[in-house]
């Protein structure tokens, strides 16, 4: 995705191509693609990185997020909660909605 952005491929074109390749019920995959696209296309700092640098930064961000989630799991085991409540998964068509918002 980073290479596509650096080559001048628009987010709409990239997300459209990915969306066509995903099966209709690939809600989790669509959400992941959308989250990564937001990071790649929404940050000039990321777009200036080499692919290896961006991968390392992404991996570090994932590790930090997992550590935070682990701390949240420990809080729920002790009865403390900062959860926002359950939200229904609505990632089908999310790529299309995100494309419309960026236009």
Image: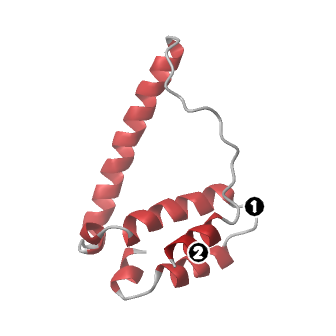
* Callout 2 secondary element: helix
Q: Residue furthest right?
A: 24
Considering only order in the chain, which callout, 2 or 1, is on the residue closer to the N terminus?
1
Assess whether mark 2 and mark 1 are in contact (beta carbons under 8 angstroms): no
Circle 2 is placed at which residue position? 100
Q: Position of residue 57 (x, y in %)?
A: 28, 57
Q: Position of residue 69 (x, y in %)?
A: 45, 33
- Give the number of marks: 2
In the picture, the disc for residue 25 is 1
- The relative height of residue 65 versus residue 3 in the rendered view (above or below) is above
Spatial CA span between label 1 and label 2: 21 Å
Q: Nearer the viewer, residue 28 or 101?
A: 101
Left or right: residue 40 versus residue 102 is: left
Which quadrant holds residue 56?
bottom left
Q: Residue at x 46, y 84 (%)?
A: 10
Of marks 1 and 2, the one in the foreground: 2
Q: Residue at x 49, y 60 (%)?
A: 35
Q: Residue at x 25, y 65 (%)?
A: 53
Left or right: residue 71 versus residue 47 is: right
């Amino acid at each position: 995705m980073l290479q596509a952005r650096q080559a001048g491929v628009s987010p709409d074109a990239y997300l459209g191509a990915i969306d066509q390749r995903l099966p209709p019920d690939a809600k989790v995959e669509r959400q992941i693609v959308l989250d990564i696209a937001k990071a790649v296309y929404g940050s000039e700092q990321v777009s200036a990185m080499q692919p290896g640098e961006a991968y390392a930064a992404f991996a570090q961000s994932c590790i930090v997020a997992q550590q935070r989630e682990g701390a949240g799991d420990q809080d729920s085991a002790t009865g403390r909660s900062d959860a926002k409540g359950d939200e229904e998964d609505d990632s089908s068509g999310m790529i299309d909605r995100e494309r419309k918002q960026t236009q």
